[in-house]
Amino acid sequence: MTTSTSAQVARSDYQRAVAAYWDREADPVNLRLGDVDGLYHHHYGIGEPDPAVLAGPEDGRGDRIIEEMHRLETAQADLLLDHLGAIGSHDRLLDAGCGRGGTSLMANRRFGCQVDGVTISESQADFANDQAVRRGVAGKVRFHLANMLDTGFEPGSFRAIWNNESTMYVDLFRLFAAHAELLEVGGRYVTITGCYNDLTGGRSRAVSQIDQHYICNIHPRSEYFQAMAANHLVPIAVVDLTAETIPYWELRRESPVATGIEEPFLSAYREGSFHYLLIAADRVES
Ligand code: GPP
Ligand code: MG
């Protein structure tokens, strides 16, 4: 599977459009943040920014904001890793929809274990593998051009799997069926995701704007739990991170790397039509 071609990996016109988006993507909001310390993320941040970042001198403000946004994005990945449970150096982890590999490299640094990341973007896989080589961990952290719905990995071979903001590109029932097969019994699944609020009805305008911006398909909150229940995944933690991500978006709006998607995120979170959730679940026997 490590020798897949893009055509084998992206199985529909939709998936090809998503792969093409990420193959082309070279946005400063991701690259300039990653350049801070070599961890390239494709997710958002949590936690309180240091007020001195905005209040300090005009000179250097843009760089200070970028460093602070990067710190908050890294804090988000650390929180995800906190929920993986006890991971030993002989365990194996799967990063489903790994982007440029930031969370995988952090997991290897924390646990010393093997990590496989999969992405349908060839340029993301190449970029991430290059980072693993630069860090001297290419023997343990490998990025594959592969479809997270059908990775080709051996059943039961992973202690934990996560999706860090990548579930909105796939059908959740198919995704969790694939994860349930790959996880050992007792293994842990964790996702951090944006989902729309069943209570407020269908997709709000702001949620639709986010879908359009990223060519994704944000799921309702309920669907996560339905798809887990249907696939041997029993939730152990559900954390609403909405209040903790709003300050990141307020800071990002003031940054030199804002992309225009900041207002839809802030509107969606503030009006309650959208939540930023962490869900952790255990793979049970049946
Ligand atoms: C992109 O992160 C994340 C997604 C496309 C998933 C959508 C997430 C939701 C919570 C709905 P990125 O870091 O590549 O985005 P950006 O370029 O805007 O920083
Ligand atoms: Mg980003």
Image: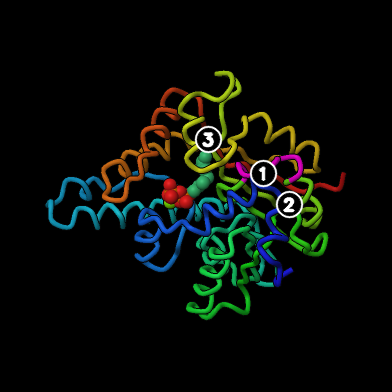
Query: In front of the other: label 3 or label 2?
Result: 2
Q: Position of residue 105 (x, y in %)?
A: 53, 67
Q: Write the start and end of the magenta stretch as one range.
A: 167-174
Please give the residue where the numbered disc 3 appears in the rendered image: 240
Q: Is residue 170 magenta?
A: yes
Please give the residue where the numbered disc 2 appears in the rendered image: 149
Q: Is residue 103 left or right of residue 73?
A: right
Q: Is residue 50 left or right of residue 275?
A: left
Q: Is residue 98 above or below residue 278?
A: below
Q: Is residue 50 magenta?
A: no
Mark 1 Cα-neighbour bin, 10 Å: few <14, some 14–19, many ≥20: some
Mark 3 Cα-neighbour bin, 10 Å: few <14, some 14–19, many ≥20: some
Q: Is residue 63 left or right of residue 13?
A: left
Q: Is residue 7 above or below residue 50?
A: below
Report the front residue among 13 and 105. 13
Tell me, yes or no, whether the two marked residues, 3 and 1, touch with CB atoms within 8 Å.
Answer: no
Mark 2 or mark 1, which is nearer the start of the sequence?
2
Q: Which residue occupies 42% across, 59% down?
A: 26
Q: Position of residue 161 (x, y in %)?
A: 68, 55
Q: Which residue occupies 62% across, 79% down?
A: 139
Q: Which residue occupies 52% across, 36% down?
A: 211
Q: Is residue 102 left or right of residue 222?
A: left
Three-letter code for the amino acid on which mark 1 is drawn = Val
Please give the residue where the numbered disc 1 appears in the rendered image: 170
Q: Which residue occupies 38% across, 67% down?
A: 37
Q: Position of residue 75 (x, y in %)?
A: 44, 53
Query: Dot 1: what SS?
Result: loop
Instruction: Give the CA distance from mark 3 to mark 1.
Output: 22 Å
